[in-house]
Amino acid sequence: MTTSGEVSMDVFKALVSRAGMELTDAELTELKEAYDVFQPGVDNLHNAQLGAEDLAVSFEPVWDPEV
């Protein structure tokens, strides 16, 4: 689901439930605030039209500052 705009609390509760999480109303409210902040950026990433010539990026979770 990558649609722009704010998601209603009912839809957000369904997403949370689908993820297998059981949260209190206070936790839902707090998480939804963060969701609303980050969701437009996630939408942009999902909707990017990249071609074969675009760079590929990889992520290594271990970082050695000496290298």
Image (spheres, grey):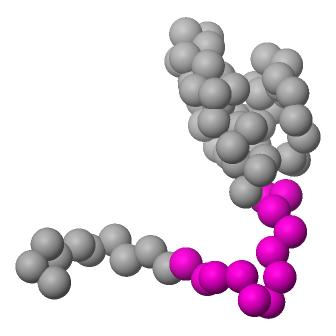
Q: Kindly identify the residue that appears in the image at 63 percent across and 28 percent down.
A: 37
Extent of the magenta region: 46-57
- Residue 15 position, x and y percent, is 77, 37
Q: Kindly identify the residue that appears in the image at 61 percent across and 19 percent down.
A: 33
In terms of depth relative to the viewer, which is nearer, 56 or 36? 56
Q: Kindly identify the residue that appears in the image at 44 percent across and 74 percent down.
A: 59
- Residue 65 position, x and y percent, is 14, 72
Give above or below for 37 relative to 60.
Answer: above
Farthest residue in the left direction?
66
Q: Is residue 55 magenta?
A: yes
Picture mark count: 0
Question: Could you say which quadrant of the image residue 60 lies in?
Answer: bottom left
Question: Could you say which quadrant of the image residue 9 lies in?
Answer: top right
Farthest residue in the top direction?
26
24 sits left or right of 62 in the view: right
Magenta segment main secondary structure:
loop
39 sits left or right of 64 in the view: right
Quarter occupied by the C terminus: bottom left
